[in-house]
Image (cartoon, helix red, strand yellow):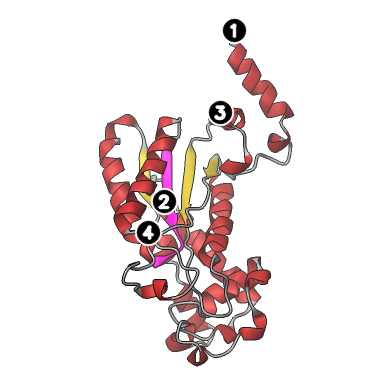
Amino acid sequence: MILTRYAIFLALLILTSPALAQSGPSVALEQLTSPEVAGLQAQGWDTIIIPTGGTEQNGPQLTLGKHNVIIRYTAGEIAKRLGHTLVAPVMAYVPEGNIDPPEGHMRSPGTISLPEPVFAAVLEAAARSFIATGFKTVLLIGDSGGNQAAQEAVAAKLANEFADAGIHIFAVTDYYAANGQVDWLLAAGESEADIGTHAGIRETSELLAIDPAAVRQDLLTPATNWPEVAGRPDHAQAEWGRALLELKIEAALRQIRRLRGQPE
């Protein structure tokens, strides 16, 4: 079989590109060139994750980009374990509450909020972009509760539209909603009140594990001192963070395999 010039080019690219060296290609889309992506697609890299985070207040001890840091790490791990999967840039602008008058996280400086229809439209356009440029499976994974409804709606809409084209769009909801983190911390001796729901043990532990510079460790005090925090961030531990991150990653992998009809 005679190879076309383009096929030869792709083969040489795969062999010689620094990003595609023997250690393996980066899974981060933004770190690759367009021809490098084409070369990977020619080898079956046809799945992409669109990770969504958020820019919101997280009390005095966690930086505004908490969700972005966490989802960048977990999406990368999910992609590596799935294989033949790339990760799109993190969507850092998500629904965080009404802007005028300010509600929810928008009452605190530094928070950025998109109306949910705008967020959904951006997410849909991103997914359509990847479908148009050759990806066959698009996975929507969000690290924040406010992202979940729009991700499910966009996935359902596009899955129906592309059902006959061999293209799949999935909202990976178990990553956020069914990851077993609370049960794990309860078994470790924490109470539900101390685990909390925002900027508490879980997120603080996760950041201590992967980006300790994002945690103001001198401000890890009981949440009762800070109304923006629900939980006890002063109970956080980096070792716990590694376990909690793994629970998110494994929950996502199980659901993805189930959605694909593969053994878990």
Say which label, 1 or 2, has the lower sequence index. Answer: 1
Say which label, 4 or 2, has the lower sequence index. Answer: 4
In space, the residues marked 3 and 4 are separated at their CA atoms by: 32 Å
Q: Judging from the image, what secondary structure is the residue with disc 3 in?
A: helix
Task: Using the image, determine if residue 257 lies above or below residue 22.
Answer: below
Q: Which residue is mark 4?
A: 114
The residue drawn where x is 60% and y is 75% is: 240
* Residue 154 or residue 103, whichever sits in front: 103
* Residue 94 or residue 138, whichever sits in front: 94
Residues under numbered marks 4 and 2 in contact, where contact means CB atoms less than 8 Å apart: no
Q: Position of residue 173 (x, y in %)?
A: 38, 59
Q: Judging from the image, what secondary structure is the residue with disc 2 in?
A: strand
In space, the residues marked 4 and 2 are separated at their CA atoms by: 17 Å
Q: Position of residue 169 (x, y in %)?
A: 36, 43
Residues under numbered marks 2 and 3 in contact, where contact means CB atoms less than 8 Å apart: no
Residues under numbered marks 3 and 1 in contact, where contact means CB atoms less than 8 Å apart: no
In space, the residues marked 2 and 3 are separated at their CA atoms by: 22 Å
Amino acid type of the residue that numbered disc 3 sits on in the rendered structure = Ala
Q: Which numbered disc covers residue 140?
A: 2
Q: Which residue is mark 3?
A: 38
Q: Judging from the image, what secondary structure is the residue with disc 1 in?
A: loop
In space, the residues marked 1 and 2 are separated at their CA atoms by: 39 Å
Q: Which residue is mark 1?
A: 2
Which segment did they paint magenta?
137-145
In space, the residues marked 4 and 1 are separated at their CA atoms by: 51 Å
The residue drawn where x is 54% and y is 67% is: 66
- Where is residue 180, by image quadrant? bottom left
Q: Which numbered disc covers residue 258?
A: none
